[in-house]
Image (tube, rainbow, N blue to C red):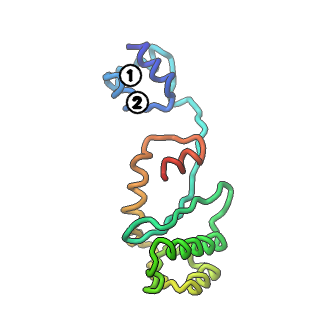
Amino acid sequence: MVKKVEAIILDDRRLTMEREMAETGLSYGTVWRIIHEELHMNKKAKVQKSAGKVMLSVFGDSHGVIVTEYLQKGKTLNSDYYCNLLEKLHEALKQKRCGMISKGIRLLADNAPVHMAQASMVTTHRLGYELLQHPPYSPDLAPSDFFLFPEMKKPLCGWRFEDREDIIFEVE
């Protein structure tokens, strides 16, 4: 059993104890003893390269996602970037939801400085969008926090990615 545990670890050093237990059929204590006392390994000591965080902006409606945009590494989300996102949203609405623009677009954004910046407000108004008021400190009014992002995170749970492209591929 020691050789089996060692082979599994060497195959994938990112393996969690729970997955090790599932693959070997051994208890937590037995797996821990084999790793630490028999193999003299310390799984916590490994250093692994990480992709870091990836910023994803999502615009959608009750019918689904309309636009997604990943912020480039090293870039900052500012009002110019957000205004460009609003322009992309407008073009996507023309293509994907024809007729919706003439009925009026309501935009629900939180009170982040980038959303409330003067340039962002001017662009929102110029595009003819109605900005819905979002009370400060009201996370219960952000539907994406309850419906979109948890569903996106589920299949990624327990995975570590070495680069941004791997994360983006899995999310898409």
Against 38, residue 50 (above or below) is below
**What label does residue 31 carry, if any?**
1
Q: Residue at (43%, 86%) from the top-left corner?
A: 103
Q: How many marks?
A: 2
Where residue 146 sits: x, y (%)? 37, 62
* Residue occupying the point 61% across, 85% down: 122
Residue 60 lies, with reference to residue 169, above or below; the image says below
Q: Is residue 75 left or right of residue 169?
A: right
Residue appearing at x 41%, y 63% in the figure: 145
Nearer to us in this view, 67 or 131:
67
Q: What kind of residue is marked 2?
A: Met
Neighbourhood count class around disc 1 (C-alpha, 10 Å): few under 14, some 14–19, many 20 upward = many
- Of residue 59 and residue 147, the one placed in the foreground of this image is 59
Q: Earlier in the sequence, mark 1 or mark 2?
A: 2
Closer to us: 88 or 25? 88
Q: Residues within 10 Å of mark 2 (few under 14, many from 20)?
A: some
Q: Quadrant of residue 30?
A: top left
Taking 28 as reference, is 48 above or below it?
below
**Circles 1, 2 touching at the beta carbon (< 8 Å):** yes
Specify the label residue 17 is tagged with: 2
| Residue name at image x 48 percent, y 51 percent | 171
- As helix, strand or loop, the secondary structure at mark 1 comes to helix
Residue 88, compared with residue 152, is above or below; it is below
Mark 1 → mark 2, Cα distance in angstroms: 7 Å
In the displayed structure, does residue 81 sit left or right of residue 112? right
Q: Amino acid at mark 1?
A: Val
Q: Depth check: 119 or 101 in front?
A: 101
Q: Is residue 113 visible?
A: no
